[in-house]
Image (cartoon, rainbow, N blue to C red):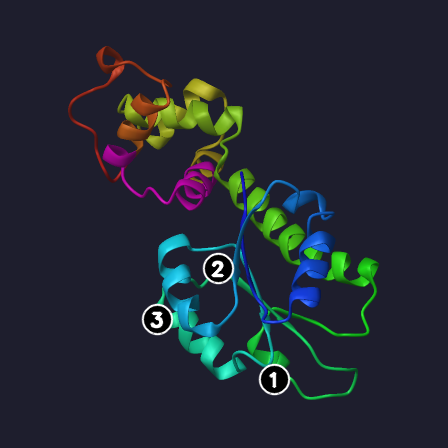
């Protein structure tokens, strides 16, 4: 998916150099760039585009203002990176997701930017994996929506009742679905069962 990147830096040489460096970051190679020369339009761009990354000069906007912009524009997942300063200088780094110093090499800049998105991708992948049901969990779902009790499911799948209950808890946690009716909708949408296979009266306490 194409990333959206805002570069809010007033100095042409710095801005061009950063853009060229960032384009070498693999995950950002095909990004769409928005270049701003002043902070006045930053809020508008955040609202309209919901960018993935904002590179902002420490001389344009302060850290507290960044925090305010995030809240006002509903961009909690946008990464803000402050550009400027030298080692040891105070640039309100706590308000930003990362900081790029004037003394950073191209390799250091690439690593800092990559790290932001690598962590994001790991979290996304982890969340997706948590939502995927195992074959056994799918069997449990099918039995539940067919109206079987925990004991009947245990007999059907050669499991203990305790194991069935544990599976059902894991399924509820993964899918955030806590009722047989909700599981029925999930099973139909995901083609685990057909309507003719489902009993009309499902005991929610089974």
- Extreme front residue here? 12
Name the residue carrying label 3: 72
Q: Which residues are magenta?
A: 166-182
Q: Is residue 3 above or below residue 192?
A: below
Q: CA distance from mark 1 to mark 2?
A: 19 Å
Q: Secondary structure at mark 3?
A: helix
Left or right of residue 156: residue 180: left
Left or right of residue 112: residue 130: left
Q: Residue at x 33, y 42 (%)?
A: 177
Q: State the image coordinates of residue 38 (x, y, percent, origin top left).
A: 49, 72
Q: State the image coordinates of residue 200 (x, y, percent, origin top left).
A: 16, 22
* Mark positioned earlier in the residue sequence (1 or 2): 2
Residue 155 sits in which quadrant?
top left
Is 7 in front, or is 3?
7
Q: Is residue 106 above or below residue 129?
A: below
**Pair 1/2: label in front:** 1
Q: State the image coordinates of residue 39 (x, y, percent, origin top left).
A: 47, 73
Q: CA distance from mark 1 to mark 3?
A: 20 Å
Contact check, label 3 and label 2, Cβ < 8 Å: no
Number of marks:
3
Q: Is residue 113 visible?
A: yes
Residue 96 sits in which quadrant?
bottom right
Q: Residue at x 41, y 38 (%)?
A: 168
Circle 2 Cα neighbour tier, 10 Å, few/some/many (<14 / 14–19 / ≥20): few
> What number is the disc on residue 70?
none
Name the residue carrying label 2: 77
* Mark positioned earlier in the residue sequence (1 or 3): 3
Q: Residue at x 46, y 42 (%)?
A: 170
Q: Main secondary structure of the magenta part?
A: helix
Q: Secondary structure at mark 1?
A: loop
Circle 1 Cα neighbour tier, 10 Å, few/some/many (<14 / 14–19 / ≥20): few
> What number is the disc on residue 92?
1
């Amino acid at each position: 998916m194409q990333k959206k990147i805002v570069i809010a830096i007033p100095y042409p040489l710095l801005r061009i150099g950063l853009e060229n460096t960032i384009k070498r970051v693999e995950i950002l190679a095909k990004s769409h760039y928005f270049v701003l020369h002043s902070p006045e339009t930053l809020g508008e761009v955040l609202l309209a585009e919901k960018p993935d990354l904002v590179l902002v000069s420490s001389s344009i906007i302060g850290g507290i203002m960044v925090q305010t912009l995030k809240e006002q524009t509903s961009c909690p997942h946008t990464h803000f990176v402050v550009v400027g300063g030298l080692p040891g200088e105070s640039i309100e780094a706590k308000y930003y997701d990362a900081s790029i110093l004037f003394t950073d090499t191209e390799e250091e800049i690439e690593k800092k930017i990559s790290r932001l998105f690598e962590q994001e991708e790991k979290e996304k992948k982890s969340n997706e994996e948590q939502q995927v049901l195992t074959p056994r969990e799918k069997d449990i779902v099918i039995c539940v929506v067919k109206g079987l009790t925990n004991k009947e499911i245990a007999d059907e799948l050669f499991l203990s009742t305790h194991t069935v209950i544990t599976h059902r808890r894991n399924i509820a946690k993964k899918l955030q679905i806590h009722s047989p009716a909700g599981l029925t909708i999930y099973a139909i949408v995901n083609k685990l069962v057909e309507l003719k296979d489902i009993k009309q009266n499902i005991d929610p306490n089974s």
